Image (cartoon, rainbow, N blue to C red):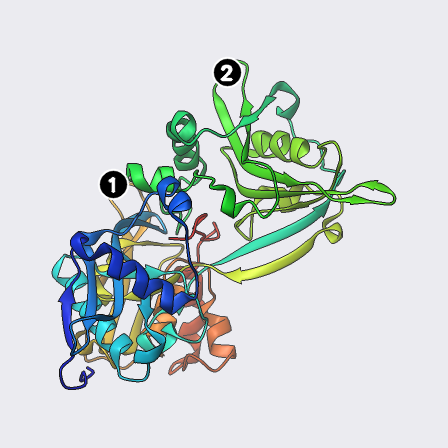
Amino acid sequence: MSRLPEGYRVVAVPETRQTEFLETDRLAFAFDSTPETDAIVPLTVPFDRTMGVEAPDGSLAAVHASFPFTLPVPGGSVACSGLTWVGVRPDQRRRGLLTTMIDSHFTRSLDRGEPVSALFAAEHAIYGRFGYGSAADDLRVKLSRGAALRDVPGSADLTVRFTTLDAFAHRDVLDAVHRAAGAGRPGWITRDTEVLRRRQLVDPPAWRDGGEPLRLATVHDAAGEVRGYATLRRKDVWTEGGPRYEVRVREAVAVDAAATHRLWSFLLDLDLTATVEGPMLPVDDALLHQLVDPRGIVPKMVDNLWVRLLDVPAALTARRYAAPVDVVLDVRDALLPANAGRWRVTTATSPTDGAWEARVERTEDGADVALDVRELGALYLGGRSLAAQVRAGLVSPVRAEAVQGAASAFGWPVAPVCSWVF
């Protein structure tokens, strides 16, 4: 636990301090806005869950907030505190303010019954020291126009419609497709409030970087139902050889392989264009398997969700497991001592769905695996390998023969990802 300098104190930040809150965050992240942009972009700050550190003069020195999410996990879901809007003024750094805010965030999340916290990290090196583990990646791809896809049954029966995106008119149908497309995928947080759904679709001119207004491509079946969509913009680029437009896809989701094929067949064959930059995709996205020439993409892997287990037994019992296991984990947790110690994780078949569910209990038995809560968070969504963590020297195999079984159990056949940054 941190100690604040004399005169500093943790305070709730009500909506009446919105202007000061935003100024603090803008100073921390070196950005600005305009009244025109602010009038278009809805403010997503959940002020009933917003806190700050007040300096001796009464001004806000640091701020943070959290969203009340339901986090999809392997085979289930768990209440999750989505940490966001974290910022410390540049002239208030190195005073323990961030550590104090994280302590407060953990305490309040546990008090609300949220055994897990998740975030997107602005800087990769910050949150590991607070026990957050990098639990998922997303893939950004750049493709040339005309990149060929393998045939997929049913794709030819689907049609594509192209229009200008309307945040109000389109948000409900796109939200429904987004939910259906991510069903069963760990990390696929849905946008459960009107303000979050609208925020994902707004398009102020200041964000266009010289491109067109956001367009919408929707994939429809014979009955007219939407099976997939992409939000995108084109930016005109003219060279001596003619047009070389860039297509920038903000989000692309589809409910099945045929819809994925039809959607990307359209995106990869727009007139005047030369390149297509993809959005945040799962590392196992169907597009990657449908490409005739996967070498033709320019891929970039980016860390996606970071996960922190606040209540180890509650978190581990909320998910399902890919194989049976009986393993004793010796967990280190410097910030939340209630998590530290040895935990026996034993699976049994669920009477409701037949999946492997776990009982997690304290034990005095000898440990099989010793690890920090950071590595346990990285494993939590099933997208990281326990065996790889052992090979990297991040996890200690007290009983080496237990590693393979535990690695199989904690894995999951669907790669985790969150398709949007909160």
Q: In the rendering, at what x and y percent does residue 206 appear?
A: 50, 47
Q: Secondary structure at mark 2?
A: loop
Q: Which mark is residue 273?
A: none
Quadrant in the rendering for residue 325: bottom left
Is 10 positioned to the left or the right of 386 in the image? left
Is 199 positioned to the left or the right of 80 in the image? right
Decide which of tag 2 and tag 1 comes sooner along the chain.
Answer: 2
Q: Which mark is residue 352?
A: 1
Cβ atoms under marks 2 and 1 closer than 8 Å:
no
Work out whether residue 148 or residue 395 is closer to the camera in this orientation and state it. Answer: 148
Work out whether residue 258 or residue 5 is closer to the camera in this orientation and state it. Answer: 5
Q: In the rendering, at what x and y percent does residue 21 appear?
A: 26, 60
Separation of residues labelled 2 and 1 (CA atoms):
35 Å
Quadrant in the rendering for residue 89: bottom left
Q: Residue at x 41, y 34 (%)?
A: 180
Instruction: Read off the residue under disc 2.
Output: 224
Q: In the rendering, at what x and y percent does residue 87 appear?
A: 33, 68
- Amino acid carrying label 1: it is Thr
Vertical side of 176 occupied by 31: above or below: below
- Amino acid carrying label 2: it is Gly
Quarter of the image containing the N terminus? Answer: bottom left
The answer to whether residue 392 is visible is yes
Q: In the rendering, at what x and y percent does residue 136 appear?
A: 46, 59
Vertical side of 260 occupied by 188: above or below: below
Q: Residue at x 50, y 13 (%)?
A: 223
